[in-house]
Amino acid sequence: MKTFNITDEIENKYRNSIQRLFNENIIERIWKKDYTVWNNDPTEISNRLGWLDCTSVTRKAFDEIHSFTDEIISEGISDVLLLGMGGSSLAPEVFGHVFGENGKIKLSVLDSTHPEAVLEKTSNYDPERTLYIVSTKSGGTVETISFMKYFYNSVLNKLGKQKVTRHFAAITDPGSGLEQMAKDLRFRKIFLNDPNIGGRFSALSLFGIVPASLVGVDIEKLFIRADSEVLLSKKSGYEIERNNAALFGILLGMLTEQKKDKLTLIISEKIRPFGAWIEQLVAESTGKNNKGILPVDLEEIMNPEYYGDDRVFVHLKLKGDSKNQTKIEKLIEAGFPLIEFELEDIYDLGKQFFLWEFATSIAGWYMGIQPFDQPNVEQAKVIARKILKDYQESGKLILPEPTYSSDEFNIYSVEKFEKAEEVLSSFLSECVSGKSYVSIQAYINPAPESFALLQNFRAEVLKKYKVATTLGFGPRFLHSTGQLHKGDSGNGLFIQIVDNPEEDAAIPDNPLENNSSVSFGILIKAQAFGDRQALIDNKRKVITVEVKRNIKEFLKNLQI
């Protein structure tokens, strides 16, 4: 770990904090799984520290994982479609993108309830050559179970009762609802994970490593690297300088205390998907009790004048990659704090997964928060469930009245506007550089073209207002940054974009049955407006644009 522009004031506090780490025996207590490091109440801590033992516990399943992988390859399976959200999907996505280019099996993740995304996956995958992995810790995640029911019935209709069971596997906790469903439906394989691991800390558990093996990752090599970081994370006393995870965690907490809470990630192209995993881990772990570290992922790297003084940069670079070096040097010259990690190769991600998990737990200790719970996540879910229940009872989606309406879109805002073109500029005029951030929340199909157009808009916001920007597709981000949006210090401005897709897809009420009382189109709309209300209830600034017609044309013309 290299650090740049750590001021004398911060350096002195840094040394004092390391001394406090010694005095309170924090490293030793964490490894003894002492929940009082973070809170006197053991709830959602004492049963969430299994990630510390991930490498040794998961190793016990290596033979089973290898056998399963060989079996799948021998049967001619060419694709894995993983159905999951958040902690169940983000690490597999990293392995699929970073390691899967030359593997015999390609992995894709479905973590969008937008009907276009569901229908695309339906048409793009041949069930005869696809393994569907249903992955959820709780076994009851609404998105994941909806995917499971939909695809199970779809494959059943195409392949028949005798074949369908061979194309489904599950990863879940023992005793979960999914475990029972998978047994009832005779899934070919059920992997039961250590239940003492929280979802966002599960990269090196079965949730991450089963998909990793399937796409060709040498999991033994990955774990040798991870083990080296595990050993270093136990260093204390005179060896503390070797414990990068602990030192990094202290530094993150300290910089946040200094109002440098926009953790801006600059990552080598080959490993860029790792940023989305970091985003969930840090945001959901630290964004609570009116505090929070905002990870800024995939933001265009600008010249220093476009950044406020709330930024800290983390540069994750593969050895030999100098692509971003000129831009990095400009940021250092401008005085921004920057932390750099150099990876020998892609297998050093084994180290990085554990380093970030340990560092986040240390940052939580420093900030005085409990990093393993997510107290605000349920709010949006409760409201969305109420919207869905009302729909099922009345046959109508009951939404608030828009403050502006035209043939092209509805706008939901606190203030009323005469002209639609004034809406965003007026809303964003409240931005304060060095304090605010703008979160773009797109409840649309996460297609590459839409992503590129939204990235262009995001860059315009950054240039004009000089504030940190984030971009998330709903409902994916609800399982990632959604906690921070409602639990942090309240400096976010949230722009929701919701569309009305031309095609929809029914969600079966039960697998093996054709009855359906709700569709994916209704589900994602309920999730969008459920989150909108949760933001409002937490006194956040939010504006919602519901696009009635062509979403691509809307995005092309989106400007401030």
Image (cartoon, helix red, strand yellow):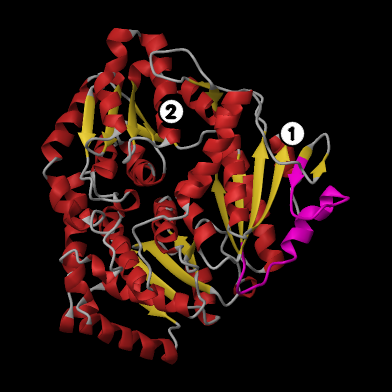
Q: Which of 158 and 414 is in front in this view?
A: 414
Residue identifier under label 2: 147
Vertical arrangement, residue 537 with respect to residue 11, above or below: above
Describe residue 362's horizontal placement relative to residue 315 as left or right: left
**Range of residues picked out in magenta:** 410-437
Asked if residue 446 shows in the view, the reply is no
Describe residue 114's horizontal placement relative to residue 169 as left or right: right
Q: Which amino acid does label 1 sit on?
A: Lys
Residue identifier under label 1: 548
Q: Which residue is drawn at 37% across and 88% down?
A: 13
Disc 1, SS: loop
Vertical arrangement, residue 435 with respect to residue 422, above or below: below
Question: Earlier along the polypeptide chain: callout 2 or callout 1?
Answer: 2
Vertical arrangement, residue 39 with respect to residue 69, above or below: below
Distance from the alpha carbon under mark 2 to that under mark 1? 25 Å
Q: Nearer the viewer, residue 240 or 333?
A: 240
Q: Nearer the viewer, residue 74 or 388?
A: 388
Q: Does the magenta stretch include residue 419?
A: yes
Residue 216 x, y percent position in the rendering: 26, 38
Disc 2, SS: helix
Quarter in which the C terminus is drawn: bottom right
Q: What residue type is labelled 2?
A: Phe
Q: Residue at x 58, y 65 (%)?
A: 490
Residue 416 x, y percent position in the rendering: 82, 52
Mark 1 packing: few (<14 Cα in 10 Å), some, or many (20+)?
Answer: some
Q: Residue at x 66, y 25 (%)?
A: 502
Q: Is residue 448 magenta?
A: no
Residue 204 x, y percent position in the rendering: 25, 49
Residue 318 x, y percent position in the rendering: 36, 60
Vertical arrangement, residue 154 with respect to residue 444, above or below: above
